């Protein structure tokens, strides 16, 4: 039996990344669609209406995955807010030990670029001139804990290697790295949580 996953993401770069990565993560029997918003606030503001529209007709083999950046928000508070929106829409939210959930909220810590640092080999395959030693440098060892912003850190490293002198194109970057990204290889804890719940969604909806 085929499964269906619906992803809500806050920006086009995440959509580009997922479209490159998900076909390698999901079985062929799983179909997916991605809805993109104009930032996190836009997603949160429009989410209640979107979920209320989906709730009455959501099939038993369908799951919804909501993916947002933490940025500077409190992770628990942000997740609680998203969970409450889903509950108010009449949907079952994933909790520890539950198997019949319909919606799961996942927080990217702190933003998509942390996942790139988690699979630095993919970055180097896309941009061979960047240093291979980056993951061994203290400030980059914890991909989800890079101080000063992961986007800013990645931009500095790419420009230092001679790429994107006029400014980094985030969607192009997401597509190039996503095409080389290996889900099993990524060390980012937040990506691993995302991968785990996506695979759980597939198993639970079949």
Image (cartoon, rainbow, N blue to C red):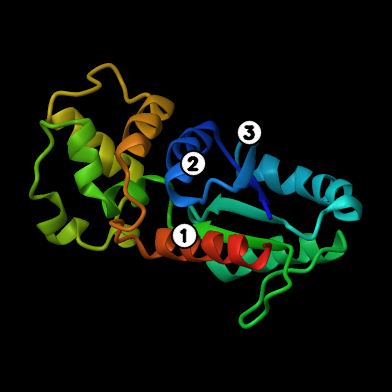
Quarter of the image containing the N terminus?
bottom right
User: Residue under circle 1?
Assistant: 195
Coordinates of residue 157 in the picture (x, y in percent): 18, 37
- Residue drawn at the location 35% of the way across and 35% of the way down: 179
116 to the left or right of 84: left
Quarter of the image containing the C terminus?
bottom right
User: Residue under circle 3?
Assistant: 38
Decide: is 160 above or below 108. above
Disc 2/disc 3 C-alpha distance (Å): 17 Å
11 or 4: nearer the viewer: 4
Coordinates of residue 107 in the picture (x, y in percent): 53, 59
Residue 163's disc number: none
User: Residue under circle 2?
Assistant: 18
Which residue appears farthest toward the right when viewing the image?
A: 56
Secondary structure under the numbered disc 1 in the rendered image:
helix
185 to the left or right of 105: left
- The picture quadrant where one finds residue 190 is bottom left
């Amino acid at each position: 039996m085929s499964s269906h996953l619906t992803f809500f993401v806050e920006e086009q770069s995440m959509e580009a990344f997922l479209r490159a990565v998900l076909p390698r993560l999901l079985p062929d029997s799983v179909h997916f669609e991605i809805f993109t918003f104009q930032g996190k606030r836009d997603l949160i503001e429009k989410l209640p209406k979107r979920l209320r529209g989906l709730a009455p007709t959501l099939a038993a083999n369908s799951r919804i995955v909501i993916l947002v950046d933490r940025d500077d928000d409190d992770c628990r508070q942000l997740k609680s807010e998203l969970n409450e929106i889903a509950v108010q829409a009449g949907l079952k939210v994933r909790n520890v030990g539950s198997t019949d959930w319909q919606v799961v909220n996942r927080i990217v810590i702190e933003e998509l670029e942390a996942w790139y640092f988690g699979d630095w080999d993919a970055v180097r395959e896309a941009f061979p001139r960047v240093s291979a030693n980056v993951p061994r440098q203290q400030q980059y060892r914890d991909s989800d804990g890079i101080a000063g912003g992961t986007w800013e850190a990645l931009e500095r490293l790419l420009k230092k290697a001679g790429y994107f002198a006029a400014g980094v194109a985030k969607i192009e970057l997401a597509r190039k790295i996503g095409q080389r990204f290996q889900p099993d290889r990524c060390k980012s804890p937040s990506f691993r949580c995302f991968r785990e719940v996506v695979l759980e969604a597939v198993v639970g909806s079949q």
